[in-house]
Each structure stands twice: as C-alpha cells, then as structure tokens.
Image (cartoon, grey):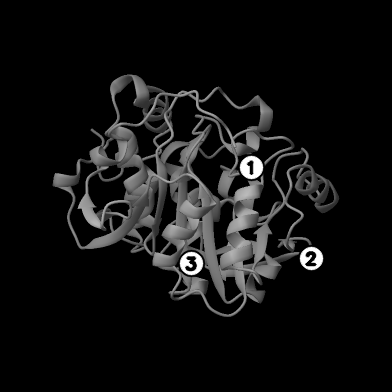
Amino acid sequence: MANYETDGRKYVPYSERTGNESIVYFTRDLSPEGIMKVYEKVNANLTGKIAVKLHTGEPHGPNIIPSAWVKEFMAKELPDATIVETNTYYDGDRYTTEQHRKTLEINGWDFCPVDIMDEEGTVALPVKGGKWFKEMYHGSHMTNYDSLLALTHFKGHTMGGFGGSNKNIGIGCADGRIGKGMIHSRGNDGWGAVEEELMEKISESTKATIDFFGKKVSYINVMRNMSVSCDCEGIAAEPVKTPNVGILASLDIVAIDQACVDILFAMKEEDQKAMVERIVTRHGLRQLSYMKELGMGNDKYVLIDLDNDEVRMTPADAVEGIRPFPQMRA
C-alpha cells in the first residue's frame, strides 16, 4: 500500500501537516500593479545582479504572463534586471538559441535583456541530499547572477501535473541538453521518467539552483489562464476551464506552490475538476512532499490578504466570488 508521504496522488489536508509556517501573500489584482503589490513584500533580499526567471512561451502562446505586464512591472521595480531562460529539450521553436530568440521577439520579450543561460554551455551545481542526482547541469550563465526572482505562471502540466515555482526553476533553469535530459530520462529512455520519479528529479534540480542563490530568491505565482497544459504547448494548449484567482508571493517555494494547490482544491467541483484531475493522475503532489523532505520549505503557511488590511485568510477565501471562465485575456 502506498505511503501518503511518497504518493503523489494523495492530497494531504492542512490539518494533517506538521512543521513550521511560512508567509504567503495574496492579491486578487491580476495586473502589473498586482505583481508590484506582492513583489514589494518579498524583495528585500534581492540585491546585486538580479535574474528574473519566467516562462516566455512558445510562439503566440495564449496563456503566458503577458509580456506587457512584465514590461511595466520591471520598468518600475527592476529596471536593471535580466530575464533568464534556457533552451528546450524537445525539438521546436526554442530548441536552439537562434530559434529561441525569434520566439522571444514574437512574444514581445524585447523590452529588456533576455539571457539564454545555456547559450555558451553548462555549469554543474551540487544537489545536496538528493537520491537521484549528485549534481545538476544548468545554463552556465546562471552563476553570473546574485539573486533570482521566479515569476511563474501557475498552470497544469502534461507530465508534472502542475507547473509552479518548482517546475519553473527545476526544468526552466536546467540546460536544454544535459540537465533537462537527466530530469526526463529513465535509463536510456530520453522521456522515461514519470510520476514520483519525475517529481523528485524536478525538485532536486530546483534545489541545486536555490541552494546556489541562498536567501536571495523570491517567488511569485500568477494564477491566471490556468490550462491543464503547460505553456510549452503554446497554441495547442487545452482550453482553460479553471477560473482566474490572483497572484501569490513568498520567500518559501514549498509554501507558495502548496498554497496554489490548496486554492485549487478549495474551488467548487466544477471549477477544480480539470486541474485537480491533471495533478492527481500525474502524481504531481509528490513535488510538494519531496521538496519538504529535502528541507526546501514548509507546507504550512499563513496566507495574507493584501487587498484587505493584510488579514489572515484561507484558500477558500481566495476563491470566494471568483468568476467562471472564460474571461478577458489582456
């Protein structure tokens, strides 16, 4: 019988979790101003040369965080920061650096420097306490930065169940040939890792990155246009069936991804069905329990409502009054 601690299909209610609490901030304001609102709560440790890791998307991808939002946010809050990405493991429009730069231009990521970190090779960073890896290969340019902001579009994922901050960093910072291959492979099969194995490998890759940056990492998750498909599927993504929610921020990667999942599970059955089914069938909840086992953060948290005098709120409060999809896309 599966142990719920390692079973990525088992949702653990808040009342059954143990350990310390972290702080997660929340706003319903889905706009550049909303990003700024939460960012100002988690930016104290972001100093020096700052990298902003986000998913810039496949050509004309409909669900990514709008580049216009990020442009306005960075102009006001991070005028000297650099967006960072890596090339893909699969053959497509971001497979080579040349293809990737064309896609960046199509999607509007031309307002600030974009560093494709594996353009000039890789760097191996240690994975402390991992059971799959002793080291993980990332884009070599990663070590040029002092701080990291993970600006994540929270959504589903075909293989990972959900894509939050963990997926954004774990797969998104691994280089496109060696690192991503290590995460996805099972033996000699380039796409063999699934379920618990894949979730654990993603998390170990993330740990290598955040251990490198130490306390100089902050996380923002945007719960908007949440298809069950990842942004890597571009215009082929499944239609969005989950209501928009808001924006979360934290200094704890486990807490922020757990809070997003808790918000999904707090939705009405008809609103949560697609996303929850995707997460559970792919064993995606193992991302959360394994990150906790690796000492990456806490799955207990205090959720702070920035729209209402910073009072403590619940995941159910976050979904109260949300409108059903479809909604206008900016």
- Give the number of the disc on residue 231: none
Q: Which residue is drawn at 34% across and 35% down?
A: 264
Residue 80 position (above or below residue 169):
below
| For marks 1 and 2 on the same chain, the one whose residue lies earlier in the sequence | 2
Q: How far apart are marks 2 and 3 (CA)?
A: 21 Å
Numbered disc in front, either 1 or 2: 2
Residue beneath label 2, please? 120
Type of amino acid at the residue the image marks with label 1 = Asn
How many marks overall? 3
User: Nearest the camera: 295 or 191?
Assistant: 295
Do the residues under discs 1 and 2 have CB atoms within 8 angstroms? no
Type of amino acid at the residue the image marks with label 2 = Glu
Q: Residue at x 43, y 59 (%)?
A: 37
Quadrant housing residue 249:
bottom left
Residue beneath label 3, please? 210
Secondary structure of the residue carrying numbered label 2: loop
Instruction: Tell me the quadrant of the picture where the C terminus can be found.
Output: top right
User: Nearest the camera: 7 or 46?
Assistant: 46
Instruction: Tell me the quadrant of the picture where the N terminus can be found.
Output: top left
Q: Where is residue 241 in the image (x, y as percent from the top left)?
A: 46, 23
| For marks 1 and 3 on the same chain, the one whose residue lies earlier in the sequence | 1
Q: How far apart are marks 1 and 2 (CA)?
A: 26 Å
- Give the number of the disc on residue 188: 1
